[in-house]
Amino acid sequence: MSSEKDIHKFIENKRADPFQFGSRYLEEGDNVFEFNAWDHVEPDDEFKAFAEVQYEKQRAAPVSDFDQNRFNNDPAKWWNLFYKNNTDNFFKDRKWLQQEFPVLAEVTKKDAGPQVVLEVGAGAGNTAFPLIRNNENEQLKVHACDFSKYAVQVMRESDQYNPKYMVADVWDAAAVPDENGDSLPPGLTEGSVDVIILIFIFSALNPNQWDLALRNIYRLLKPGGQVLFRDYGRGDLAQVRFKKGRYMQENFYVRGDGTRVYFFDHDELVQMWGRWTPEKGLQVDLENPLSESQLAEGNTSFEVKHLGADRRLIVNRSSKLKMYRCWMQGHFRKRGGDVASAENAE
Ligand SMILES: C[S@@+](CC[C@H](N)C(=O)[O-])C[C@H]1O[C@@H](n2cnc3c(N)ncnc32)[C@H](O)[C@@H]1O
C-alpha cells in the first residue's frame, strides 16, 4: 500500500466515523506481511476454521463445577490478587479516549459546566488519569470505581491522583440493592451521573450479572446520560487461543489468574442495551432480533447510538503469523433529557 493511499484513507476515515480506530486497510493484492498491523480486516477462512476447532476443544474440556464456583463466588478476590501482583503497570494508559469518544472531549472542555463522569471497573486508573490530565473543566468530577480494594488503593496512591477532579472508591457494579434499596457508589445518587465509562469491565462479569449492572447504570444516569463502552469482541484472538480447562460457558472463560472474561457479539450487545427496561430486565433473544426501526421506537430505556466492531490484523512479520483482534465499541444513551445537548456532544 503506497503511503499516499494510506494518508488519503486516514483522512477519509477520520472524517467519516469517529468510532474507527485505524486507517490501514488491507486490500486485494497487498502483501499482508508488509506492515505490522492492518485495520478493519475480517478474519480469513483459515482463521475461522481454526477458531471453530479451538471452540470444540474448549467445550470438550470445561472448568469443573467446583472451580466454576470458586471463580464465580468471589470474583473480587481474583482481581485483588491480580492487582497485588501487577500494581499499576499492567494496562496501558488509554490515550485514545477523547478521539474515540468525543463526549469525553466535550465534558473536559473549559466551559462544559458541572459534569459527573463515572468510570466503572476503573482498575489502576488507566482511563481516569489520562482523562483528568487532559481536562480543562474546573467543574469536572470523575468517580473511578472498582470492586477490587487493591485497584482502588493503586489509584489513590498514584502521583496522578488529584482529589479536586477525581475520587476513587470501592464499588461492585453488580451490587444487589440492600434493605434501603442502596446499591450505588459512595457519593453518587440516583440520576446524578452525566457519563458512564465501561472499558473492559462488562467482559469481567458473569452473564447472569449483566441485568444487575444495567439496573445500577440506569439508576445512576441522568435522563439523557451517556454510556461509553469498549470490550472484547467475539472471535478475538484472546478467545480463540484459550486452551482446555478455561471454558465456563459459551464465550465465557477464566484466565490462568482466576479472572473471568466474556467475548461479545454485535447483535447480543444491541439487544442487551436496546431492549433492556427496568420492568422487563434483560431480553437477549438472538433467535428473534429486532429491526433497527423497532429499536429506535423509544419505548425502551437505552438508545443504541453507535455500535461497531474494531477489527485489527496484527502480523508477526518474521514468523509470518497472522493474529486477528476484535473489540466492540458502543455509545448508548439513557432516554429522556435534553436530546439537543446530547446530540451536540457527539
Ligand atoms: C480488564 S480490567 C479493566 C480495567 C480498566 N477499565 C482499563 O481498561 O484499564 C477489569 C476491571 O474491572 C474490575 N471489575 C470486575 N468486575 C467488577 C465489578 N463487578 N464491579 C466493579 N469492578 C469490577 C476489575 O477489578 C478490573 O479492575
Image (cartoon, helix red, strand yellow):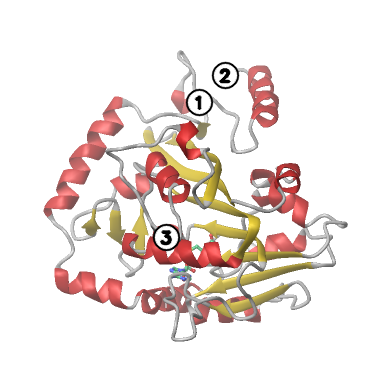
Asked which secondary structure carries label 2, the reply is loop
On the image, the x and y values in percent for residue 201 come to 47, 61
The answer to whether 73 is drawn above or below residue 289 in the figure is below
Camera-side residue of 267 and 85: 267
On the image, the x and y values in percent for residue 342 come to 71, 47
Q: Give the mark toward the camera: 2 or 3.
A: 3
The answer to whether 200 is drawn above or below residue 154 in the figure is above
Q: Is residue 293 visible?
A: yes
- Tell me which label, 1 or 2, sits earlier in the chain: 2
Image quarter in which the C terminus is found: top right
On the image, the x and y values in percent for residue 227 come to 58, 54
Image quarter in which the N terminus is found: top right
Q: In whole angstroms, how far apart are the C-alphas of marks 1 and 2?
A: 8 Å
**Mark linked to residue 279:** 3
Camera-side residue of 269 and 60: 269
Q: Are marks 1 and 2 in contact (CB under 8 Å)?
A: yes
Q: Give the mark toward the camera: 3 or 1.
A: 3
* Residue depicted at 74% across the width and 44% down the height: 340
* Residue depicted at 74% across the width and 78% down the height: 163
Label 2 amino acid? Met
Q: Is residue 92 visible?
A: no
Label 3 amino acid? Glu
Q: Is residue 274 left or right of residue 164?
A: left
Q: Quadrant of residue 204?
A: bottom left
**Mark linked to residue 34:** 1
Q: Give the mark toward the camera: 1 or 2.
A: 2
* Residue depicted at 71% across the width and 60% down the height: 131
Task: Give the farthest residue toward the top.
Answer: 29
Q: In whole angstroms, how far apart are the C-alphas of marks 3 and 1?
A: 53 Å
Label 1 amino acid? Glu
**Mark linked to residue 1:** 2
